[in-house]
Image: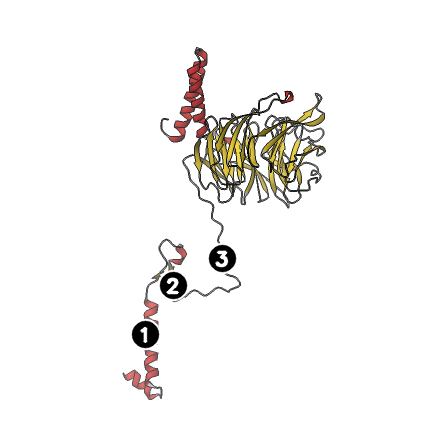
Amino acid sequence: MEAAAALGGSGLPVALIVLILVLLLAVALHRSAPWETSTAPQDGPRENRHARPEEPRKAKPAARGRREKKPQQHSFAHQLLVAALKGHSSRVTCLDFSSNGKYLASCSEDRTVRLWSTRDLAGREHRCLRANVGLDHAEFVRLSPDSRAAIEPAKGKKLVPLAFIIWLANAETIRVYKMIKKDDGSFTFSVTSGDFPKKHKAPVINIGIAETGKFIMTASSDTTILIWSPKGEVLASINTNQMNNAYATVSPCGRFVASCGFTPDVKVWEVCFSKNGDFREVTRAFELKGHTAGVQSFSFSNDSRRMATVSKDGTWKFWGTDVEYKKQQDPYLLLTGQCAVLEPCRIALSPDGRTVAVAGTTDIVVCNTRRGEEEERFFGVHSHCITDLAFDTTGRYVVSCGDHAIRVFHNTAGHRAVVEEMEAMLKKTGNKATQERLEQQISSALKALAAIYGKKH
């Protein structure tokens, strides 16, 4: 009170004196208080849980805004997931296995192509080689046939067993890369001289290299398929007469080119060469007819004796194509299954033709081609629509892409299909050697299933 009186004596109003004393007391208590716990929920961001009371946060300038968070990696887990290959920084658009099964190629909107070692698929670390695509990105990638001169080597140089082609999204043309071993033992990639000339008038929907190494295929979304020489010369142009092309590819045997589109069929052509390797002609081979709406995708078995198709009519079909088409024999329908995924759909047939995988939006269904029944279903595999789907050359894995990651699954349906087929054959045979062989195959398939699930099947 004496202090107040002293201040009052100085001419200050008593109310003002009291207010000053209250403010001084509040400041003293404020400085001596501990850090406060934020009112944000405990599962919120850690940086928001505590703040210094004496240093309130300043509002950031409106022009700057908050720091943008990096997009979260899509989270996916499944008992049958073997691996998620994470090397690309943007959406992966295409996959391709080398014919010897040693490499998996992937291309992405991040302007790179990566070559993965398939020996590492089941491991924790996944090695890959990277090739940069300057000022563009690859929409499709295809590995050249192994140990064949699918891509013409420079004069005086040895054949390069590993090369690949890409379709440049912006330049709209084919570019060829080859692998070169450096003096220090490391590898690099070199672009061969000159991109292919620009010929397509509509967006390209797929590319391919024949296993024979004799030709390259490009197909656009109109009705055009072009057959190229490895040097970039157009050998033939095919008009599919399907109003539009939805998908096209080269058969694993390298003899056929096929396409599907608006019409409810798949058309197959044979690309013919003379005995000395010169191109002769492209002739119609056969057609797959049976769907009631446009076919979205199709796939060949490794020996091209079986095909699988998926259509907008809500079904997938399994076909026998081992026919003498030159004698007017038509392919025969083996089985029809229901398509249990949403459009747009992609289909992949295992190399042995025993299983089929169908992808729609972000889901994958794997079915047995013997009965047509669903064996496995994977929900929400990728954060965006699946862009490519394939089996590896052994048929052990199903591989997909649709976001930054490539996901690899065990093909358990394939192992079960082997057991089912071999047991049926075992009942019909009386030959001891055949019985032993079948029993060995059954045993191997059961051991593979046991290793995957960790229990007996």
> In 3D space, how far apart are the residues under numbered discs 3 and 1 (Cα atoms)?
39 Å
> In 3D space, how far apart are the residues under numbered discs 2 and 3 (Cα atoms)?
21 Å
Residue 246 is situated, as x and y percent measured from the top left of the image, at: 60, 38
Q: Which quarter of the figure is the N terminus placed in? A: bottom left
Ranked by sequence position, the earlier of labels 3 and 1 is 1
Q: Tag 1's secondary structure?
A: helix
In depth, the one of 243 and 362 nearer the eye is 243
Residue 265 is situated, as x and y percent measured from the top left of the image, at: 59, 32
Which picture quadrant has residue 3?
A: bottom left
Q: Which residue is mark 2?
A: 52
Mark 2 residue type: Arg
* Mark in front: 2 vs 3: 3
Q: Tag 3's secondary structure?
A: loop
Mark 3 residue type: Arg
In depth, the one of 398 and 308 nearer the eye is 308
Ranked by sequence position, the earlier of labels 2 and 3 is 2
Q: Tag 2's secondary structure?
A: loop
Q: Which quarter of the figure is the C terminus placed in? A: top left
Which picture quadrant has residue 153?
A: top right
Q: Which residue is mark 3?
A: 67
Q: Which residue is mark 1?
A: 25
